[in-house]
Image (tube, rainbow, N blue to C red):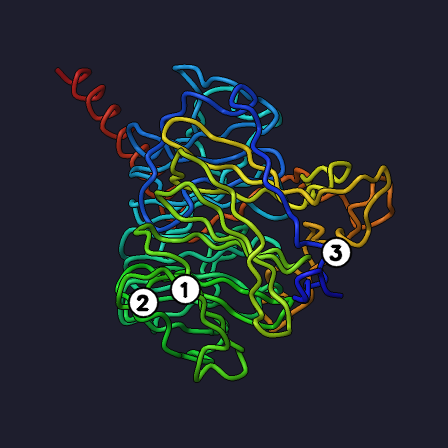
Amino acid sequence: MSGASGKFVRASKFRHVLPKAEKKENSYLDIKSSASGDGNFIKASGEFFSLPTTGGGGPVFIHPLTVKGKFHANQPTLNVHKGPVVDTDWSPFNDHMVATASDDCTAKISIIPEGGLHGHQEESAATLAGHDKKLHLVHFHPAAENVLATSSYDLSIRVWDVAKQTQIAGFADHPDLIQSFEWNINGSLIASSCKDRMIRLFDPRASGAASTFAGLSGGKQTRVVWMDSVSKIGAVGFDKSSMRQFMMWDPRNTAEPFHTLDLDQSAGAIMPFWDNDVNILYLAGKGDGSIKYFEVTDEAPFVHYIDENRSNEPQKGLALLPKRNVDTSQCEIARYLRLLTNWIEIVSFQVPRKADTFQKDIYPDTYAGVPSMSADEWLAGANNPIVVKSLQPGAAGAAVAGTPKAFVAAKSAAHEVEELRAVVAQQASRIQELEEELAKLKA
């Protein structure tokens, strides 16, 4: 169809997606974070958000999404590390399971009790030890239960079975610092960006990279994003003139970018988020107040600017809530937490419609948040598709996502050694006590 000007108007359900920020009093206030590193700093499950904070060891705020208002001075924290926590991630299948990555060279798995932390929690459920240097990023597998990937300054990405507390796969072919990595939608591949300005696609269960190709030309951070629903992979970063750019490749032919989009001249790294249900790409800059968003289609020019959430307060980090958290009665398609200087703002993205019924055309069946395979099945080569379900209230579908589950990790070899050392030390102490008592009797 065409307008009065004679220009064609692109037909799309998402040409007018509007951002809406919650009032400050309905947000999370007076928060002190220790945001640093290359991650998003703040992450969320369907029930909690996690945010590293200042203090001894590696304290992390774990806070219920439903409890808003001011943080109090003695806000309980999760503190299971010996060094600062640099990244966190939540299990897609258990809203109470959080992974933390630390400078102490370990990742840990912790289970958060119902209602959140009732006091400072210093015990983890599993420890993943094996990296030679401090950790960098951590991401749960999207389809296999109890599978986690970590990256480190030792230039490796390692994959763990967290229930067995053992490494089960990995990739150590990066020649320089790993800047980002992401699983694809079924966890069959990982894409990574590296300081050598190359992007690598690989199956961590196999040796070598399936594809290595040139990324963005600038020297600052590049971050990758899978765009599975349009069969593309994207990356955001900088060109040689420090222009922020978005590039997109066809994974079957990575010799040249499929599409390049100049964004702006701002200095902060960009955090990319892809909505696989509606083909919308959100690009949020660290240190600025904007979240630009685009619809990606199969027809030129492929990437269509929709709008921008603008704020006078710069964001330090951003967390996307699970799709099951959106309010379908408000035609909400995404909800984010914006980490600001000392508070967290809630921003909703909505399709403006006057309708009282469920809008099926903007809510296709979505990620259910239940596993489609076990860790052993994935390691054996399975690449099962994710489980999906309807967001329509009352609709029959997959099991309730994020349901808390009992989790007891098997003892790792390292844990067994530590327990034996503890037993030996206890016995040595008892022997010393008995020898001292015997000496007194002889005196």
Q: In the picture shown, does residue 255 fall above or below 10? A: below
Instruction: Say which mark, if any, is on residue 262.
Output: 1
Q: Quadrant of residue 326?
A: top right
Q: Image point 33% across, 63% down: which residue? A: 238
Badge 1 or badge 3: first in the primary sequence? 1
Instruction: Say which mark, if any, is on residue 249.
Output: none
Q: Which residue is mark 3?
A: 388
**83 or 317, nearer to the observer:** 317
Q: Which residue is mark 2?
A: 239
**325 or 266, nearer to the observer:** 266
Mark 3 near mark 2, Cβ–Cβ under 8 Å? no
Badge 3 or badge 2: first in the primary sequence? 2
Camera-near label (1 vs 2) is 1
Q: Image point 39% across, 15% down: which residue? A: 73
Q: What element does badge 3 sit on? A: strand
Q: Quadrant of residue 336?
A: top right
Mark 1 near mark 2, Cβ–Cβ under 8 Å? yes
Q: Quadrant of the C terminus?
A: top left
Q: In the picture shown, does residue 386 fall above or below 389? A: below
Q: Return the x and y of residue 329 as percentages of the image width and height.
A: 77, 36
Q: In the picture shown, does residue 359 fall above or below 151? A: above
Q: How many marks?
A: 3
In the displayed image of the protein, which residue is found farthest to the left?
443
